[in-house]
């Protein structure tokens, strides 16, 4: 069995949040493999923990991918401030063709376009992928999972950080399907009576007050804040309210554009023009929407750059959704070089945390050997880009740890789901499998 087949059978996906099935990238050809350990979401530390404690597995995964795609260069991109992780990875790289590239402590250093440019000096085509310019990028946890898949082990666990208003900020590894409620309780509990979760981080994550949200293969962690924190209040505003505020208040100052990481890389992304489109109906709507096409949804425009606390990122999200629905394709130019102030306008993480008013929650959140044994696990059938799993089990079935719970069509893009523990199938719905122990 080839590595591509082993990784496909193991259900490995992008563990940094993207969720792209890893076996697809292994089928391409590239000259450079990049391990993404930049991890720039404030307060989240799971990638640093993976690199510190699983350095050998990460580097082994890089080498396996290099062999699969025919690459000569292997690079681990990691922030210089993560000293323990840097030391561990550098030690694991000795005697291998893999090297470390140190990155600055800015946001969003982990954006794929930023990282590829930092490592190779190349610019990915608009709306393109790294493979188009000879690079393959994987999250460091994904690479550790690829190394495990090569030995026949499927993805059944997930490493996450719990940060913010919790009694013990911590990074821990839990069975896939564990609910946040169980993970938080095992780690020591909440430090607020009215918690709201930013699953995946404050900048790019999803906001919910449902503590029974399941942890899936793409979950990087959660920042928990009180409901009355101003960031949460902003995130919970309904989309029509956000749009009305922008329509009435945006004065076209351009700060959202001038701080946009993609604009500074040379891409035609101009959030201020997308905000301008809020004032129009049909006139020029398609033209202005195009300026959102290459937005990476990093959130800097909304949560850092805008002096009026408007919602440019959300306007770009809406524009991209409208374009997909209308099948509008990007027709603008490709970048030729970064903006002259690309380096000078990078946003330091410390300044971003000050803006977000989360400095008091800044904590290392070290990896702890905490065993989380939830009685009930909820496994969504779709945990990656592509198609959902078709269940292989039914209510009442007994399953073993590592057993496939679903399958995919031969030509479907997706990732196979496995039982994280020995359990009984308590239910199978249209979109999830529920296990009990």
Image: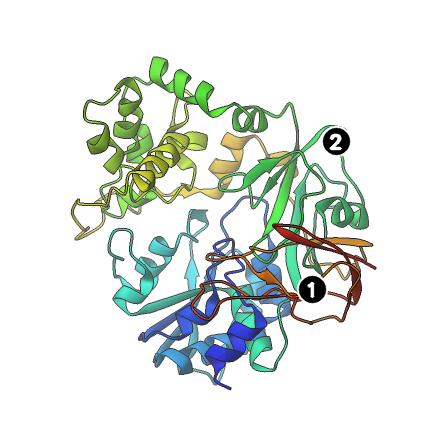
Q: Residue at x 40, y 16 (%)?
A: 244
Neighbours of disc 1 within 10 Å: few (<14), some (14-19), many (20+)? some
Residue 100 in sight in this render = no
> In this orientation, which residue lies closer to the viewer: 239 or 419?
419
Is 329 rendered above or below residue 73?
Answer: above
Q: Position of residue 122 (x, y in %)?
A: 25, 61
> In this orientation, which residue lies closer to the viewer: 41 or 158?
158
Name the residue at the top extreme: 248
Which of the two discs, 1 and 2, labels the residue nearer the N terminus?
Answer: 2
Quadrant containing the C terminus is bottom right
Q: Residue at x 27, y 43 (%)?
A: 327
Q: Is residue 257 left or right of residue 405?
A: left
Q: Do the CB atoms of the residues marked 1 and 2 lie less than 8 Å apart?
A: no
Q: Is residue 164 left or right of residue 435?
A: left
Residue 73 in sight in this render = yes
* Residue 194: mark in rendering: none
Q: Position of residue 354 (x, y in %)?
A: 52, 32
The residue where tag 1 is placed is 393
Is 75 rendered above or below residue 305?
Answer: below
The residue where tag 2 is placed is 192
Q: How is the image coloured?
A: rainbow
> In this orientation, which residue lies closer to the viewer: 220 or 387?
387
Question: Which mark lies nearer to you, 1 or 2?
Answer: 1
When asked about the image quadrant of residue 206, the answer is: top right
Q: Position of residue 6 (x, y in %)?
A: 53, 79
Q: Secondary structure at mark 2?
A: loop
Give the distance between the C-alpha atoms of the residues marked 1 and 2, in whole angstroms: 39 Å
> In this orientation, which residue lies closer to the viewer: 359 or 128?
128
Q: Secondary structure at mark 1?
A: loop
Q: How many marks?
A: 2
Q: Residue at x 68, y 37 (%)?
A: 210
Q: Position of residue 199 (x, y in %)?
A: 59, 43
């Amino acid at each position: 069995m080839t590595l591509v087949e082993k990784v496909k059978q193991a259900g490995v996906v992008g563990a940094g949040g993207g969720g792209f099935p890893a076996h697809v990238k292994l089928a391409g050809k590239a000259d450079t493999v990049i391990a993404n350990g930049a991890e720039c979401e404030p307060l989240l530390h799971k990638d640093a923990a993976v690199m510190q404690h699983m350095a050998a597995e990460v580097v082994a995964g890089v080498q396996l991918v290099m062999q699969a795609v025919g690459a000569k260069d292997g690079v681990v991109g990691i922030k210089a401030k993560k000293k323990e992780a840097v030391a561990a990875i550098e030690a694991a790289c000795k005697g291998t063709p893999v090297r470390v590239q140190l990155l600055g402590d800015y946001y969003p250093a982990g954006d794929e376009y930023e990282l590829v440019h930092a490592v190779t000096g190349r610019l990915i085509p608009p709306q393109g992928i790294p493979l188009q310019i000879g690079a393959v990028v994987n999250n460091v946890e994904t690479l550790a999972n690829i190394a495990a898949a090569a030995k026949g082990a499927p993805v059944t666990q997930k490493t996450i950080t719990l940060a913010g208003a919790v009694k013990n900020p911590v990074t821990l590894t839990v069975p896939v399907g564990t609910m946040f409620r169980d993970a938080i309780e095992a780690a020591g509990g909440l430090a607020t009576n009215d918690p709201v979760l930013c699953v995946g981080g404050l900048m790019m994550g999803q906001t919910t007050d449902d503590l029974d949200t399941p942890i899936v293969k793409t979950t990087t962690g959660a920042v928990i804040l009180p409901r009355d924190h101003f960031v949460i209040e902003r995130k919970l505003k309904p989309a029509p309210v956000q749009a009305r505020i922008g329509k009435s208040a945006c004065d076209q100052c351009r700060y959202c554009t001038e701080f946009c990481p993609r604009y500074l890389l040379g891409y035609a992304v101009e959030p201020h023009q997308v905000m301008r489109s809020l004032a129009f109906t049909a006139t020029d709507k398609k033209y202005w929407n195009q300026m959102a096409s290459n937005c990476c949804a990093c959130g800097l425009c909304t949560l850092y750059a805008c002096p009026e606390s408007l919602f440019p990122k959300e306007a770009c999200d809406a524009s991209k959704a409208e374009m997909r629905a209308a099948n509008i394709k990007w027709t603008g130019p490709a970048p030729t070089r970064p903006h002259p102030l690309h380096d000078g306008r990078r946003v330091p993480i410390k300044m971003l945390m000050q803006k977000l008013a989360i400095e008091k929650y800044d904590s290392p959140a070290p990896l702890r050997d905490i065993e989380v044994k939830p009685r009930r696990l909820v496994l969504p059938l779709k945990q990656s880009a592509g198609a959902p799993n078709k269940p292989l089990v039914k209510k009442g079935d007994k399953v073993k740890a590592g057993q496939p719970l679903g399958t995919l069509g031969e030509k479907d893009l997706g990732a196979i789901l496995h039982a994280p523990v020995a359990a009984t199938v308590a239910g199978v719905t249209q979109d999830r499998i529920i296990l009990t122990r």
